[in-house]
Amino acid sequence: MIGVFSYLIFFATTASILAIAVLGLNLQWGNTGLFNGGVVAFFGAGAYGTLILGGTAQAGHLGGFGLFYPLALLGGMAAAGLMAWVVGLLTLRLRHDYLAIATFGVAVAFENLMRNAEWLAGGAKGVRGFERPLRAALGDGFIYNLFFFVVVLLILIATYMFLERLVASPFGRLLRAIREDEEAARSLGKNPARIRLMAFVTGSVILGLAGGLYGTFYAFVSPQDVLPTLTFQIWAMLIVGGAGNNRGAIFGAFLIWGAWTLSGWALSRFAPVDVQLYTGSVQFILIGSVIVGMLMWRPQGFLPERLVVSQRGKPQQTQQGE
Amino acid sequence: MSIVKTMGATAALAFGMSVLAGAAQAQDCTTKIGAVLPTSVDWGRPIAETAQFAVDQVNAAGGAAGCEIEMVLRDTQVDPKVGVDAAKALVDLEGVNVLLGAVSSGVSMPILTSVTVPSGVLQMSCCSSSTAFTGLATEGKTGGLWYRTFATTGVQSAVGAKVAADQGYKSVAVLYKNDDWGQDMARLIATDFAAVGVEVTASVAINDGQPSYRAEVTEAVTSQPDALYLALYPAEGTAAVREWLSLGGTQNMILANSLKSDEFRDNVGLQYLGSALGTDTASPRSESADAFRAAYQERFASEPNGPGLANSYDAAMIVLLAMEAAGKDASGADVAAAIVRVTDPDGTPVSADTAGFTAAKEVLASGGNVMFQGATGNVRFDANGDVSAPAVIWSFSDAGTDEVEFMSLNDVDAFMASLK
């Protein structure tokens, strides 16, 4: 029984970390309409940043600063934010699919940089030698995982509340105005370029936070963690959960990651022995089918965006649907 | 690795089969072991099949530690998250205390740091080559729970340096695959070449799947080396060597074991490979390696020539032998500690098949140690869980490959020590 509980904690930790990343993407795509095709670059910047700043010294590459953990995590977030700022300045004039292609290119460039720049982050071998915070006090086992899960959960809740506030604020309305009609927003004297950049950087910092927690959890990151698959997974979570809805983003993360892992477990347990070898491929088909089905029958996601219409002189009303 | 199967092997197999018939009885318990391997990737599936093959042989000998063995296989999709989750599920939900895998170092490493070491589970990888594991073990962070049967990086580069020295090459250019294995190879071979007094004139990374390698190869050619060292896979190796030759590069080549492929030989052309010498870790000159080969052919109707197959078999077999040695209800650490008892150079030699496992059971039960003679050799681990192996230098021929020189495990160890 303790085994099941221990696994569920582990699962929920990974899912929560991914949920934070999906929240970051939701701010960019769901609320501002920025098609970030390079999610993994900002996630990776957070992970690499945190491990390099907080890790022990490693021969042959940058690192070993051994910073106090929260500072290292903030450093990882800053690295993601800084990269988003530079990338944003260069690419945010692009629209929709052009922006997607440009940011996708950034992500591929990021992975290649990490794979080749051995002096920076160990090249293909990745960054290791990170001591997880408070490990000495809590040991390595179940208690530590429980503790880490609680911390991740609290960060997830804090991120969620922050974004809910942000989206409900006038700034959030401005984001949606830019998403729906940039010309109209400009005609009202707003500066869409600046606002888009702010949303892009904020979302990327959140992605970096998720990446930092991910690196901490595994105490390791390598170029294999920043392949385009992760971008796809996080997008799938947002689309299935419901773009524009923060609860949908979190729900989507748990649902997709749950389906991803549960299908693997179920196939390994229940599939006949001679099919066992093919379960990996079967799993890909299952996951693909779920996403295609979702796009066909419920493109707005399980928890669609709730549009808030404000009217002068009346209290706010909530209204369902698009 | 072109070993002809012998009469002895066939006899050993026949004996194995007869044991199979007699011993598969009277276990009423099942012990699960976990395997996390990339079965959704074409080259990953045979690795998993081979591990299962070892488990089947052991079950035919009546299982290990008194129980039948069930291997629970999970796919990693070569995605670290997925692999780690699968490993955690195997440990927590299936209760395994022994885990085989993964293949990619980038997947094996987070499994090691976040699942197996914290949970005290033995992790044995067939194929992870990164030197980062050695570093981690030296720092004492693997807790003695990490082993791998993939020997080729260190042995491979040392023997490559030996070839260059023996042939009298004064300078060598290196082309390497741009992944953790290739980067390690490039670094190790540079050190080893320096140790034998060979100059490296250029060391160029080759990325997978490019339409042309002209820029990379030109850089290597213009450095005008006596020979070319290739740590590449067949597809990129073929493309790079074609460009190399067309730009007037030398035909003196040293090849890593990844290029020991008929595809590479045929696509480049045997007439250009006359001065090419390859290196590889070798099967031991023992019946057990032949027995593995014969039994494998019997089961899969093909030669065990894919990447990692022999390593995967040995990984599974050593783990199962160690489980037998550690006895019933042993923890992961107990099994890890028992590995020295089954890879003891002074122990009773046992072959890599059902008969060998049955023989090992008797020796271990009477308190003795055994020396497992596996598909990759007389596997012997050092304190970091790394393995050394005999080596062979080979050249291409019409039929496949010819052996040029065989180096026993002691020769290899001595030569590697001389490089330090």
Image (cartoon, coloured by chain):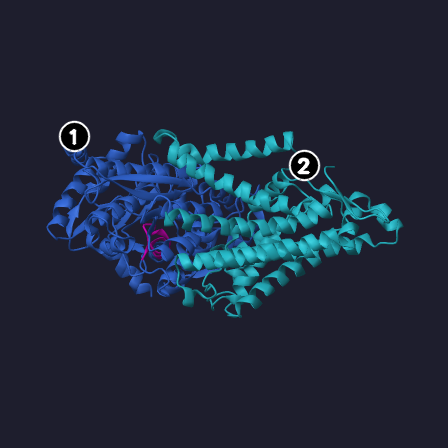
Chain colours: A cyan, B blue
Chain letter of mark 2 equals A
Q: Is residue A82 above or below residue B354?
A: below
> Are the two marked residues, 2 and 1, in contact with CB atoms closer than 8 angstroms?
no
Please report, as a chain letter, where disc 1 is located.
B
Residue in the foreground of this view, choosing between B83 and B353: B83
Q: Is residue A119 above or below residue B368?
A: below
Q: Secondary structure at mark 2?
A: loop
Based on the picture, tell me whether residue A271 belongs to the magenta stretch.
no
Q: Which residue is mark 2?
A: A300
Helix, strand or loop under label 1: helix
The image shows residue A238 at horizontal and vertical percentages of: 62, 43
Q: Judge by depth and name the residue closer to the eye, B192 or B147.
A: B147
In the rendered image, which residue does mark 1 sit on? B21
Q: Can see residue A264?
A: yes
Q: Position of residue B86 (x, y in %)?
A: 42, 45
Q: CA distance from mark 2 to mark 1?
A: 60 Å
Q: Amino acid at mark 2?
A: Gln
- Same chain under badges 2 and 1? The reply is no
Residue B178 shows in the view: no
Quadrant (top left/top right/bottom left/bottom right) for the C terminus of chain B? bottom left
User: x, y (%) of residue A219?
Assistant: 47, 59
Amino acid of disc 1: Ala
Name which residue lies at 70% across and 55% down: A165
The mark closer to the camera, 2 or 1, is: 2
Q: Over which residues does the magenta segment extend? A: B145-158
Horizontally, is A132 left or right of B311 in the view?
A: right
As drawn, is A109 to the left or to the right of B88?
Answer: right
